[in-house]
Amino acid sequence: MARQQTEVRELDEGSYVMIDDTPCKITAYSTAKPGKHGSAKARIDAKGVFDGQKRSLSQPVDAKVWVPIINRKQGQIIDVRDGEIQVMDLETYENFVMRADDENLSADDEIEFLEYEEQRKIV
């Protein structure tokens, strides 16, 4: 799995974090001051990168969390059919099929997409 461990205090809005074994992009990050009997806590609100679901996480700021390594790649569209596109990765020349939400895509267009393990999404 392409991920690494980091402390919660090193995260900020716009970075990625694993919540429920799903890569998520942080939309809100807030901390609460340490109390009489505990350490400072962080509350993270995030949105799933590939499924769009909202998730939240509350942890002490010195806790370790997993951060996914999401690659941003370039691709060229080979074919468009029934809401799916066939794409060639311009770095590895690998061909694959992915869902396309945008109706304005056509063959020979270059796109930018995110990739994590076998999941891909057009940016």
Image (cartoon, helix red, strand yellow):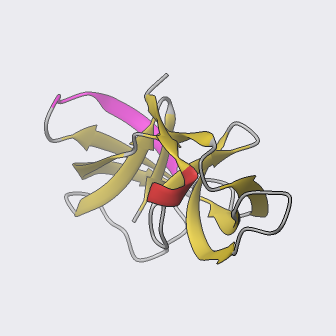
Please tell me which residue lies in front, 96 or 10.
10
Q: In this rendering, is residue 103 above or below 9?
A: below
The residue lying at 62 percent from left, 56 percent from top is 61
Quarter of image, res 70: top left
Q: How many marks?
A: 0
* Left or right of 69, for residue 119: right
List the single residue furthest toward the right: 37
What secondary structure predominates along the stretch shown in magenta?
strand
Picture residue at 59% right of the left edge, 48% below the top: 62
Q: Residue at x 40, y 33 (%)?
A: 96
72 to the left or right of 121: left
Between residue 83 and residue 10, name the one nearer to us. Answer: 10
Q: Quadrant of residue 28?
A: bottom right
* Magenta segment: 92-99
Magenta residue check for 48: no
Looking at the image, the residue that sits furthest to the front is 36
Closer to the camera in the image, 9 or 44? 9
Q: Is residue 84 left or right of residue 122?
A: right
Q: Position of residue 36 (x, y in %)?
A: 84, 66
Q: Horizontal and vertical percent for residue 123?
A: 39, 65
